[in-house]
Image: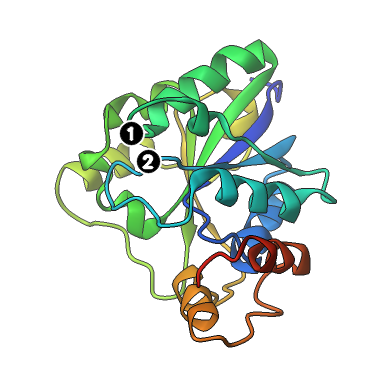
């Protein structure tokens, strides 16, 4: 098989708010995996956690501002336009239909999230639509027994070329530069009237001030 598919990355999250930890990881993935581009996809209604107090349209607007000057990163707000919980499989299927046959898809998630992936809606169908790229943080550990462990062992590859050789079906683990920035910490700083500058882009911080978010 020769390389033939241009991979597109998808990084979902609440982005409450988006910060340099998200953005640096996204950019490193574009470079190390040679992605066509990576889409940051704000979740409107998280299926596995309480909905953020910050409205989805504000969180998407902040992502738009954060990636405006980086051609390799895009904001994809499709989940804001669907009713009900924001299921990842639905977004991937819609994106797959839009991209056509020239691209492969790569769903990006943390190693902590994959430990509970068997609670996701239609989780066993994810690899029939996309590859999965797991972000390894310091001290990370994949499950070593059980249904998810078996699924990982069966589908994991070490060769990055798989994401260009086929459109879906592979699991990769990528170790990236750790940036210990937390959206929770940023919200707490803002709620306490303290500065969050240098933790997130200035234009995002300006938007937060203008809209009086996280007060």
Q: Nearer the viewer, residue 37 or 154?
A: 37
Q: Quadrant of the N terminus?
A: top right
- Where's residue 100, x and y in %? 64, 12
The spot of residue 175 in percent (x, y) is: 55, 63
Q: Earlier in the sequence, mark 2 or mark 1?
A: 2
Number of labelled discs? 2
Residue appearing at x 75%, y 34% in the figure: 36
Q: Position of residue 194 (x, y in %)?
A: 58, 88
Which secondary structure, mark 2?
loop
**Residue drawn where x is 68% and y is 23% of the image:** 5
**Residue 187 seen:** yes
Picture quadrant of residue 160 = top right
Which residue is at 47% across, 51% downward? 14
Q: Position of residue 167 (x, y in %)?
A: 56, 22
Instruction: Say left or right for 119 vs 104.
Output: left
Which residue in the protein does label 2 denote?
45
Query: Disc 1 marks which residue?
Result: 85
CB under 8 Å between callouts 2 and 1? yes
């Amino acid at each position: 098989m020769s390389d033939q598919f241009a991979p597109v990355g998808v990084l979902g999250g609440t982005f409450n708010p988006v910060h340099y930890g998200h953005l640096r990881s996204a950019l490193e993935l574009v470079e190390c995996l040679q992605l066509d581009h990576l889409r940051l996809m704000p979740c409107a209604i998280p299926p596995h956690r309480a909905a953020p107090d910050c409205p989805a349209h504000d969180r998407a607007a902040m992502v738009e501002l954060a990636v405006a000057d980086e051609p390799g990163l895009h904001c994809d707000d499709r989940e804001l336009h669907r009713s009900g919980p924001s299921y990842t499989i639905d977004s991937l299927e819609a994106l797959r239909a839009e991209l056509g046959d020239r691209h492969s898809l790569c769903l990006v998630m943390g190693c902590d999230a994959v430990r509970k992936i068997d609670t996701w809606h239609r989780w066993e169908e994810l690899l029939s639509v996309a590859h999965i790229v797991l972000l390894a943080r310091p001290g990370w550990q994949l499950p070593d027994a059980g249904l998810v462990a078996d699924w990982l062992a069966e589908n994991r590859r070490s060769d990055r070329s798989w994401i260009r050789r086929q459109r879906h079906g592979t699991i990769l683990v990528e170790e990236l530069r750790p940036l210990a920035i937390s959206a929770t910490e940023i919200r707490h700083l803002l709620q306490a009237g303290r500065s969050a500058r240098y933790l997130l882009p200035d234009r995002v911080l300006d938007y937060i001030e203008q809209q009086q978010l996280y007060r």
